[in-house]
Image: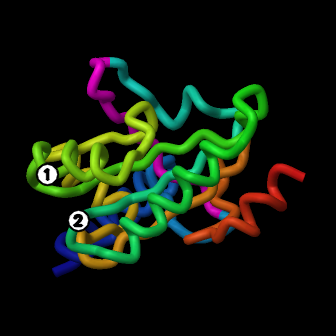
């Protein structure tokens, strides 16, 4: 019995030691570091959140089954298109979570979205990203991340984005 208790105690200590040293403990709430990720653009380029450090990044998850997230993606896209190009203080990474890339491409075309800021993820990459950001295709969220990688707003409106540029 004493040996079993010693093994359990050792296991608990080991578990706390490993989890305390892990830098993968992220929360997708205001004030926490944003989970890291990278996405592959349609032209083959890879964009990672870490390479955009030093700029504000608006990560907008959306799907065709979530009307609210699709509307927000359109609002964000139009807002950023209206900014002078030399004032690119906010980078939009609009991440589509649909299963069909063909559907994604058609929506981007029909909604006249900036293709350079639109990304489609699927398979394991989508699962990992959805898990780390707590997303689902029925209630997608958007995150404004500051130049230090900290989430400063969840589902920001255009007024919040305007304040960031001021």
Residue located farthest toward the top when viewing the structure as drawn: 44
Is residue 63 at least partly visible in the picture?
yes
Does label 2 or label 1 sit earlier along the sequence? 2
Q: Main secondary structure of the magenta part?
A: loop
Going 14% across and 51% down the picture, which residue do you hit? 103
Residue located farthest toward the right when viewing the structure as drawn: 166
Q: x and y percent of residue 148 in the render? A: 72, 43
Q: Is the Cβ of the residue at disc 2 closer than 8 Å to that at disc 1?
A: yes
Is the residue 165 above or below the residue 131 in the image?
above
In magenta stretch: residue 38: yes
Q: Range of the magenta residues?
A: 32-44
In magenta stretch: residue 144: no
Q: CA distance from mark 2 to mark 1?
A: 8 Å
Q: x and y percent of residue 17 in the render? A: 45, 55
Q: Which of the numbered marks, if any, corresponds to residue 64?
A: 2
Describe residue 75's horizontal placement relative to residue 141 as left or right: right
Describe the colour scheme in one phrase: rainbow
Q: Which of the numbered marks, if any, corresponds to residue 71?
A: none
Q: Quadrant of residue 130?
A: bottom left
Q: x and y percent of residue 26 in the render? A: 49, 59
Q: Which of 87/34 is in front?
A: 87
Q: Which element is circle 1 on?
A: helix
Binning the other alpha carbons within 10 Å of mark 1 as few (below 14), some (14 to 19) or many (20 upward) gives: few
Is residue 123 at least partly visible in the picture?
no
Describe residue 9's horizontal placement relative to residue 84 as left or right: left
Going 11% across and 44% down the picture, which residue do you hit? 102
* Disc 1: which residue: 103
Q: Which element is circle 2 on?
A: loop
Going 71% across and 49% down the picture, which residue do you hit? 146
Is the residue 165 above or below the residue 91 in the image?
below
């Amino acid at each position: 019995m004493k040996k079993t208790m010693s093994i359990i105690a050792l296991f608990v200590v080991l578990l706390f030691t490993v989890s305390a040293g892990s830098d993968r403990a992220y929360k997708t709430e205001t004030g926490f570091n944003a989970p890291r990720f990278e996405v592959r653009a349609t032209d083959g380029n890879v964009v990672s959140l870490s390479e955009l450090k030093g700029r504000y990044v608006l990560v907008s998850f959306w799907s065709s089954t979530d009307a609210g997230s699709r509307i927000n993606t359109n609002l964000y896209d139009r807002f950023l298109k209206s900014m002078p190009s030399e004032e690119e203080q906010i980078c939009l990474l609009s991440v589509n979570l649909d299963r069909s890339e063909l559907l994604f491409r058609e929506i981007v075309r029909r909604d006249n979205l900036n293709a350079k800021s639109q990304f489609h993820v699927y398979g394991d990459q989508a699962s990992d990203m959805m898990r780390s950001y707590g997303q689902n295709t029925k209630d997608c969220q958007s995150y404004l991340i500051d130049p230090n990688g900290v989430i400063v707003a969840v589902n920001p409106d255009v007024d919040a984005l305007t304040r960031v540029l001021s």
